[in-house]
Image (tube, helix red, strand yellow):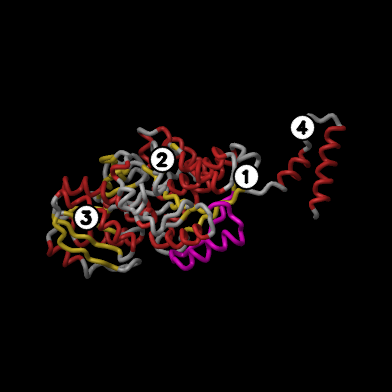
């Protein structure tokens, strides 16, 4: 149908309504006009299949909740939002292909997503080349560095320097200075080790070994006797998802907890639920979010209640909450900018001061890193309020730029 015919039909509808003395446009006219209004599309590449599939599914659920809230509030000038999900299969090449498809075929306005340090860099390469905003919801140090950063790059998630640093400052002071790392051999694991070492150096930690394993490893039995023989005070499990689950369970079964404190830079709610209370009992780690924040943070209670209502009483996980915040921050910036124009939305995101689910946050100007708190949690097996009550929040490292690598260190000019 040509634009001339569409405009003629639109005029006929409005004139007919006015002639009838209507104070509002007829339902048919509203439906007709809204059909001509394009949705605001947010591409969402995440690893629905693979080792991090459980976490990715929760990212999607929480992101859909942010979309629903935006639409229920009327959208932006009558424009509704839409989440366009793609499976990146935890593969950088696949992620690049799917991101390009989202931009060129699906015509998305913005990209939010990822759940791997390497994958998000692949996505970021595509988005900055195509001049599309990308808000990453996965941990990475490199994405903030000048070689990977662009004005289109935002990082909603914590980064390894922040996370491992907070956990290390807590754990090394409390449990001891002799440390072994069991490290997934890719960017996430390497960056977490660096974060622990940076935090631990002024505390005088002694690194006994950095033992590396491939991502997706099922059997850790060959590593455990060596770790036990080293007699560390702390074993830092620098892995994620199913790798974290398997390594914790096997270390527990091996009896390592009798001499060594198990510490994870990112202690996942989903891994704890899947692994069970006994296997994870006493394990300490960091997280961006835990639902029991609702006891002290009003915005956490709001998110949790909306999530419970939408998903049969469930609570959002840590990475799920990042999916929610990553989408909501972009859509909030659209409203604040009064536009979907990329440069205007970038400017609005840079100015954003927000509290969507965990307390105050903002994006640092030089690298667009979200400045936020880090929670230290300990897994428990007793005194559980309900099946979701799996952690105690034992410490909170407050938000602050002093806990980030400096802009100069990242290569950004002052």
Q: State which mark lies toward you, 4 or 3.
A: 3
Pointer 2: what residue? 362
Q: Nearer the viewer, residue 253 or 263?
A: 263
**Local SS, label 1:** loop
- At a point 52% along the width and 54% down the height, the residue shown is 111
Give the CA distance from mark 4 to mark 2: 41 Å
Q: Nearer the viewer, residue 230 or 15?
A: 15
Provide residue 249's location: percent of width, then percent of height: 27, 59
Earlier-in-chain disc, 4 versus 1: 4
Number of residues whose C-alpha sits closer than 10 Å to that of mark 1, classed few (under 14), some (14–19) or many (20 or more): many
Q: Are marks 4 and 3 in contact (CB under 8 Å)?
A: no
Give the CA distance from mark 3 to mark 1: 46 Å
Pointer 1: what residue? 80
Pointer 3: what residue? 197
Asked if residue 106 is among those painted magenta in the image, a careful observer would answer yes
Provide residue 224's location: percent of width, then percent of height: 20, 65
**Local SS, label 2:** strand
Along the horizontal axis of the image, is 371 left or right of 403? Answer: right
Number of residues whose C-alpha sits closer than 10 Å to that of mark 2, classed few (under 14), some (14–19) or many (20 or more): many
Along the horizontal axis of the image, is 292 left or right of 3? Answer: left
Q: Most extreme residue toward the bottom, as rendered? A: 222
């Amino acid at each position: 149908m040509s634009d001339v015919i569409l405009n003629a039909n639109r005029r006929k509808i409005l004139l007919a309504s006015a002639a009838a003395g209507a104070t509002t446009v007829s339902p048919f006219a509203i439906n007709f006009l809204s059909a001509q209004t394009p949705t605001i599309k947010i591409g969402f590449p995440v690893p629905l299949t693979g080792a991090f599939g459980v976490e990715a599914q929760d990212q999607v659920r929480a992101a859909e909740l942010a979309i629903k809230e935006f639409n229920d509030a009327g959208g932006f000038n009558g424009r509704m939002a839409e989440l366009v999900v793609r499976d990146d299969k935890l593969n950088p090449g696949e992620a690049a292909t799917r991101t390009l498809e989202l931009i060129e075929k699906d015509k998305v306005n913005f990209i939010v997503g990822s759940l791997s340090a390497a994958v998000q860099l692949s996505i970021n390469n595509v988005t900055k080349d195509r001049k599309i905003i990308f808000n990453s919801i996965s941990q990475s140090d490199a994405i903030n560095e000048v070689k990977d950063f662009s004005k289109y790059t935002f990082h909603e998630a914590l980064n390894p320097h922040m996370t491992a640093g907070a956990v290390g400052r807590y754990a090394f002071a409390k449990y001891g200075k002799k440390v072994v790392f069991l490290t997934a051999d890719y960017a996430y694991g390497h960056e977490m080790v660096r974060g622990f070492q940076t935090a631990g150096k002024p505390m005088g930690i002694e690194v006994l070994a950095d033992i590396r394993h491939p991502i997706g490893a099922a059997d850790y039995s060959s590593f455990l006797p060596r770790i036990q023989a080293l007699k560390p005070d702390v074993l830092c499990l620098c892995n994620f998802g199913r790798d974290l689950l398997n390594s914790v369970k096997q270390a527990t079964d091996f009896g390592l907890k009798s001499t060594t404190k198990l510490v994870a830079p990112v202690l996942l709610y989903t891994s704890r639920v899947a692994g069970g209370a006994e296997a994870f009992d006493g394990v300490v780690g960091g997280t961006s979010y835990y639902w029991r924040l609702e006891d002290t943070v009003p915005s956490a209670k709001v998110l949790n209640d909306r999530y419970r209502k939408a998903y049969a009483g469930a609570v959002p996980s840590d990475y799920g909450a990042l999916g929610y915040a990553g989408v909501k921050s972009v859509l909030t910036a659209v409203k604040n900018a009064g536009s979907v124009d990329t440069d205007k939305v970038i400017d609005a995101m840079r100015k954003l001061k927000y509290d969507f689910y965990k307390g105050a946050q903002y994006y640092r100007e030089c690298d667009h890193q979200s400045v936020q708190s880090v929670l230290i949690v300990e897994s428990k097996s007793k005194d559980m309020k309900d099946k979701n009550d799996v952690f105690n929040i034992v410490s909170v490292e407050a938000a602050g730029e002093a806990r980030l690598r400096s802009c100069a260190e990242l290569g950004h000019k002052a």
